Image (cartoon, rainbow, N blue to C red):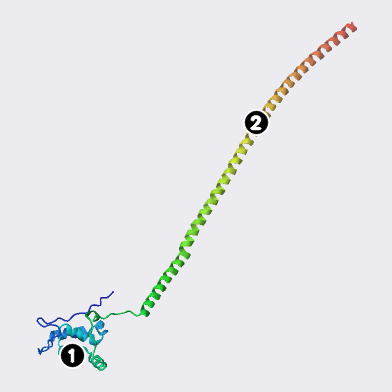
Amino acid sequence: MASTEQPDPPTQDGLPPGDSGPAPPREALIITAVKFLQNPKVRQSPLATRKAFLEKKGLTDEEVELAIQRSGSTEEVLALSAVGPPHPLHASQLVPVVHSPAGYRWRDYGALTIIMVGIAFGFHQLYKKYILPLIMGSREDKKHLQRMESNIAAMSGTLTQTVSQLQQTLLTVQELLIQQQQKIQELSKEQTSAETSSSTNRILDNQTIGELKQEIVSLKGLLLS
């Protein structure tokens, strides 16, 4: 907050406040008083208050009038003198108080509210367009990965079961092959033994036939003799 203190014109050493002696005007004090009267904050206070303040600081009536004329406050002096003599004020009432209009405060509040709403809307749009898709995308990716893992686990279980069944089938086929080989070997042995016995029988039959032929020949010889 800006300070409302007013610059005080210097007082003359050795002269009490409000002294109106016949001394000539002091140019340095008049220049300082002119700057004091031209201060925008000082102009907001009543002119009578400003005159009383300058007189209290040690300026004479002549010096105060010169300072008022140089600062351009003559019209204010005439207007106030037509109304009547000013009432004496305390030193605490000489400082002008600047009040900010309520309209400016409400306008500042409205501008701040609009800015905050704009920031909130921009953040909402940013979240909706960029942040939320990233979050949802990561969630969808996570769900997709979970589904893939579930499918892979199910396929792995099915594949393991299929491999086990194939192994059992192969073992069964291997046992059947072994049994078939054993049967084939048995049949081969039987066939071999059968062939051996048949050849033996043939040999015996041939021998028997030969013997019978010899007996017949010998009988024929006996009959002929």
Residue drawn at x 39%, y 75% is 109
Q: Quadrant of residue 210?
A: top right
Disc ID at residue 217: none
Describe residue 54's horizontal placement relative to residue 218 as left or right.
left
Residue drawn at x 70%, y 24% is 186
Q: Are marks 1 and 2 in contact (CB under 8 Å)?
A: no
Q: In the displayed image of the protein, which residue is found farthest to the front? A: 87
Mark pair 1, 2: CA separation: 137 Å
Q: Single out the mark in the foreground, 1 or 2.
A: 1
State which tag comes first along the sequence, 1 or 2. 1
Q: Does residue 35 show up?
A: no
Mark 2 highlights which residue? 175
Q: Is residue 68 above or below residue 150?
A: below
Residue drawn at x 65%, y 31% is 175
Q: Residues within 10 Å of mark 2 (few under 14, many from 20)?
A: few
Closest to the observer, 94 or 140: 94
Question: Residue 42 location in percent, x, y?
Answer: 24, 83
Q: Secondary structure at mark 1?
A: helix
Q: Amino acid at mark 1?
A: Glu
Disc ID at residue 65: 1
Closest to the observer, 164 or 48: 48
